[in-house]
Amino acid sequence: MKLSSTLPALILPLLLAACGSVEMAPSNAPSIVVSQDEERECGQGRILFPAGEYKAEVASAEGTYYKAPKRLRTLGVLIGRSEDGGIFVSNAAGNPQAVWFGDPKDEIDESPGTLFGAIGLSAPKLWPYKPRIPFSLKK
């Protein structure tokens, strides 16, 4: 059997498993407030997180996606772009964090704003980073 014919069969289940079900965050969900600009290494690039209020956008069984108050700046591999996105706070032990880009509501509103959303892979890719970004809850 050729690799070109087996590769899609191997990758598709992994992609589908990575897509969790997301729902709109409740209207009374607390926001998080980042008090100062933060910079984190993610993969081969750096992400600049602006200070301000990050509102709970969507939630899943795995955690909550908080949307940045303005576009995130990326440096390095993505060479100085600005992207919609924010901070994902996991429900796992220790509440690890990750950056996300795109629109996590694609799955909910059925009007995809990204290529991945258009093909049904609407949960944004998560890029973990350390250390965690300090924040306070705003109710």
Image (cartoon, rainbow, N blue to C red):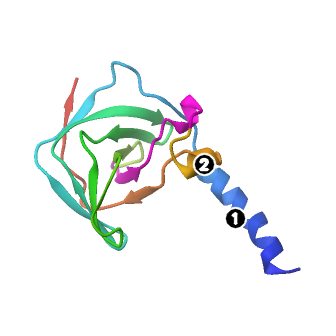
x and y percentages locating residue 39 in the rendered image = 20, 60
Residue 93's tag is none
Query: Is residue 65 one of those drawn in magenta?
Result: no
- Residue under circle 2? 121
For this rendering, which residue is in front, 63 or 111? 111
Left or right position of 3 against 96: right
**In the image as oriented, which residue stretches furthest toward the bottom?**
2
What residue appears at the point 53 percent right and 38 percent down from the top-left corner? 106
For this rendering, which residue is in front, 51 or 113? 113
**In the image as oriented, which residue stretches furthest toward the top?**
28
What residue appears at the point 15 percent right and 45 percent down from the top-left corner? 51
Which of labels 2 and 1 is toward the front?
Answer: 2
- Residue under circle 1? 11
In the image, residue 118 above or below residue 24? below
Question: Which of the two discs, 2 and 1, labels the residue nearer the N terminus?
Answer: 1
x and y percentages locating residue 108 in the rendered image = 55, 31
Quarter of the rendering occupied by the N terminus:
bottom right
Left or right position of 3 against 60: right
C-alpha distance separating marks 2 and 1: 13 Å
SS class of the residue under badge 1? helix
Please report the bounds of the magenta region as a residue range.
94-111
Q: Quadrant of residue 38?
A: bottom left
For this rendering, which residue is in front, 27 or 79? 79
**Residue type highlighted by circle 2:** Leu
What residue appears at the point 57 percent right and 43 percent down from the top-left corner? 20
